[in-house]
Amino acid sequence: MNIPRASGWALLILPVALRADGLRTMADFQALAVPYKSEIRAPSFETTPDQIRADATAAMAAGDAAIDRIARQDPASATFESTFGALDEAASENTLVASRIFFIQQTSTSKEMRDTANEAAKKLQEWNIGLGYREDLYAALKSFADTKPQLSGEDQRLFDFTLRDYRRKGFELPQAARKEVEALFKEESPLETDFSSNVVNTRVALVFTRAELAGVPDSFLSSPGVKTGDDAYTILVSVTPQRMMVEQNCSVAETRRKVSVAELHLAEDVNVPLLNRIVALRAQIATKLGYASWDDYQIEVKMAKDGGTATRFVEDLIHGTKPKFDSEIAEMRALKVAETHDPAAQIDFTDWRYYQNQLVKQKYTIDAEALRVYFPFEHVLRGMFAIYQSIFGLKFEQLQAPYVWAEGVTMWGVTDAKSGEPMGLFYLDMFPREGKYNHFAEFPIQPGRLMPDGTYLRPTVALVCNFPPPSNGAPSLLNHQEVTTLFHEFGHCMHAILTRAHRGRFSGTSVPGDFVEAPSQMLENWTYDKAVLDTFAADYRDPSKKVPAEVLGRLQEVRLATMGVFYRRQLSFALLDLKLHGPRPAGAPVDSQAESNRILGEVFFPVPEDSAFVAYFGHLMGYDAGYYGYAWADSIAADMATVFKAAPGGFLDPGIGMRMRQEIYSQGDSRDVSISIEDFLGRPRSNGPFLRRLGIQE
């Protein structure tokens, strides 16, 4: 998942001298950028609560000063760069601070730091909203716009998008109505921050005996923090990999039920009322701006263009996947009947993961846990690095990090393999800890852009994951799905780092929300390819043993065989997101809990009436009215993957890799992504490969 950046607004080592510890310093790496008129800038992370407050205050003051300069200039001498360009530059500078503070909120080891960052983020958001409603700034921009300047490329795009922003803020409304919209945005924004913070800070632990965890691998139960007594094992329901380990493997139905039910109540008390208020405010904002609903407002700037198109896309897939979904559930039910000796047994929300795993083991003779020996984390990471370096023409090297926020975090530099030009930096924060963002995502920290002095500020990003840590002398061992997740998330890093967009607004992953996942979803195909896996996957106890071809073949079969369940779950999330943000009567009370539970029950599995899945559904902030984008982007990804499949080198073809780098990654949103997609494909895009994968279309 790519985390939308917290905008203030809208294996191979280069042959150079190394330090004693074998790692190049930041100063050395920065020096490499000078001949290319590029700048490598290590983020200056705040390390105390006072520094967070001070930097947030300074960022707001600097932003005010920059806007004052734009607003007070003589209209007669105004230029595109002194108006629209200066606004984008000011926004980009503010983003550097806002993104760091948001990142601290999600990753700091200190609760005080996280709480302070949370409060600072809310202040920055409120200030930012107010800044967007400054009449004098709009007047300066409008005055220049009225001269009808002759622009092209990114400049024309920035011009058009900025004016669209003002329309979407209500600047075509009477002033009184505009003030009402501003007030609603200011009320809604900090509630989003609180919701996200509650998701991160929620910690729910359940303690079980070994007998209650029958079927769960010993390797997991002996890992740090899990075995907490002679016969006591603590499962953190709020940590996704731990919860899923039990749901997939535990043969004790009551244990699975307790874990699944606990999941459905995470952050319930605090986030359900917050979400109800947020949804109501979003509906009010949309109505006042002249939209039928919040989904229409949000999707206007995406590929789908409106909520109706997105909803039809999702509902058509729900209808199309029903036969496959029903068939898969029938197979799982047969296993449950055989195991429980109850002919009336049904699959429900507490056990679908377990019986899906049993189906995989019995029908396809694949034990997902047994495959972990082929995927020690360090080997997978280095192997993935080697592949991405090869196909995208890059080199990665670990650097001496001036600062890291937690033990085990590392910093890496990326250079162009041919020219040696530094392309950017990425951090790796790969294992779970208390208070840390609890899923897997790429966080943009410093977007790339062309600076006013003509130098290019190269991007910095962070990959934040929660893979199983090493334990009892054994390395961290990933399952195949976790390997796929790593390939996916690192794809977002590549998208961000390889940008050549001039404007911060169009940099890297700042593309329409229903496209941003496509390049990374496409890269998931790499982990199902024998030629790719053989470059790094081997039994860590005997490296001569590779993943057998027949096992990989069964993994590919499993991927297709469980696609119905996977997508019905994804589509249930997408539909509840769209329905929550769809048209609703003015002033009608919002019951997000009941609405969401109803849709989950209709599309996937019924859940208890008091369930509150939405309270922990963090995508509703930042991806609101946008979760459909995963399926939308997956249809694009399936089509893009056909280009690699047809290439002489398959998924390791460097020629196609460079084409992807040039036509997709480097472009960002500097041009319409539909053009980028078609230029990469060499033809108009098609949904055919995606529909065939789902078994909907022959």
Image (cartoon, rainbow, N blue to C red):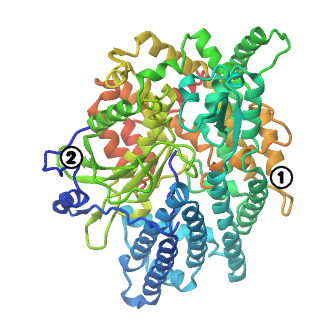
Q: Name which of mark 1 and mark 2 comes first in the sequence.
A: 2
Q: Residues within 10 Å of mark 1 (few under 14, many from 20)?
A: some
Q: Nearer the viewer, residue 7 or 172?
A: 7
The residue carrying mark 2 is 22
Q: Quadrant of residue 13?
A: top left
Instruction: Single out the mark in the foreground, 1 or 2.
Output: 2
Q: Nearer the viewer, residue 394 or 408?
A: 408
The image position of residue 396, as x and y in percent, is: 27, 44
- Residue 317 in view of the camera: no
The residue carrying mark 1 is 591
Q: Amino acid at mark 2?
A: Gly
Disc 1 on helix, strand or loop? Answer: loop
Disc 2 on helix, strand or loop? Answer: loop
Seen in the image, is 279 located left or right of residue 508? right
Task: Answer whether labels 1 and 2 touch (C-beta < 8 Å).
Answer: no
Point 40% across, 36% down: residue: 683
The image position of residue 306, as x and y in percent, is: 64, 51
Point 77% across, 30% down: residue: 257
Q: Quadrant of residue 227?
A: top right
Q: Nearer the viewer, residue 338 or 484?
A: 338
598 over 322 or under it: above or below: below
Seen in the image, is 411 located left or right of residue 16? right
Q: Quadrant of the C terminus?
A: top right
Seen in the image, is 577 located left or right of residue 372? right
Point 72% across, 82% down: residue: 176
Q: Amino acid at mark 1?
A: Asp
Q: Nearer the viewer, residue 360 or 670?
A: 360
